[in-house]
Amino acid sequence: MIPLYDILPSRRKPYVMWCIILINVIVYVYELTLGSRGMRVFFYLYGLVPARYTVEQFQVMTGLEPSFLPFISHMFIHGSFLHILGNMWFLWIFGDNVEDIMGHTRFAIFYMSSGIMASLFHFLLNVHSTVPMVGASGAISAVMGSYFVLFPYSRIVTLLPLIFFFTLVEIPAYFFLFIWFILQLVNGLSSSIMYSSVAWWAHVGGFAVGTIWGWFFRRRVYWL
């Protein structure tokens, strides 16, 4: 299933979401100037590497000291064009309506704090990993979790493959996002058995955090 857009209009322009997308694009363009070796060093410096905090031998070998910065900076780094395209596309679809409900400042706080929480979830389940986690998907999963709670009956126009051709269907947001979450959970459980380069548990943790934020703001809207 490939989501194309949702049918829910926003009342105000999502300036924070646009800024987040712009920063991600600028950082990715900068990455392209580094070359393969330079990009690898960049990932280890600013991506989240759990072993940097838990394995003394890794710290000695790499010279990487524990730092809080990667828990934030990893959200603005991507490993490939398809990586950043997919993440920014999902943020574009779901982010504007969530920002509309939360407001610009609260959305910025929500996005950053949820990304940090998602990275902590990944960290706790991969404490000795030497692989840098990069990408905005943890924070964007939180956006999707909030959308799931705030706009369950919105419709997601989706490109659906049917054997030899594609068709467009409108899928209720609660169904689309529930299926998406289950896939992340299944992949996360599978990655516990077999190695995976995708931070599935950051997706799961981010989505869970996002639903809590969404519940809070849904109650707030009802009170108003």
Image: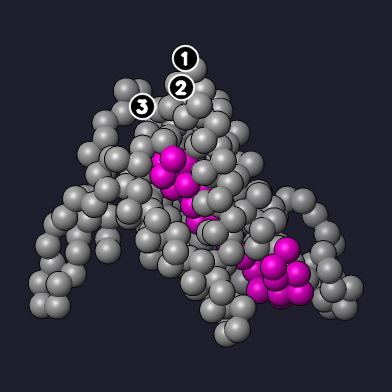
State whether residue 61 is above or below residue 199.
below
Which residue: 52% across, 35% down?
215
Q: Label 1 vs label 2: CA separation?
A: 5 Å
Is 76 on the left-hand or right-hand side of 29?
right
Q: Is residue 103 magenta?
A: no
**Residue contact between numbered discs 1 and 2, judged by CB atoms under 8 Å:** yes
Q: Which one is in front, 118 or 171?
A: 171
Q: How many marks?
A: 3
Three-letter amino acid code at the position of disc 1: Leu
State whether residue 45 is above or below residue 198.
above
Mark 3 falls on what kind of element? loop
Q: Label 3 vs label 1: CA separation?
A: 22 Å
Of the image marks 3 and 1, the number of the one nearer the N terminus: 3
Is 181 on the left-hand or right-hand side of 199?
left
Colour logic: one colour
Instruction: For label 2, count other residues whose C-alpha is less than 10 Å away and answer few (under 14), some (14-19) or many (20+).
Output: few
Q: What mark, if any, has residue 13 been given in the picture?
A: 3
Mark 1 falls on what kind of element? loop
Mark 3 vs mark 1: give the one in front. Answer: 1
Q: Label 3 vs label 2: CA separation?
A: 19 Å
Q: What mark, if any, has residue 224 been given in the picture?
A: 1
Q: Can residue 63 be spotted in the picture?
A: no
- Which residues, given as a range, are shown in magenta? 124-149
Q: Which one is in front, 135 or 195?
A: 195
Q: Which one is in front, 49 or 118?
A: 118
Residue underneath mark 2: 221
Q: Is residue 145 magenta?
A: yes
Q: Position of residue 68 (x, y in %)?
A: 77, 51
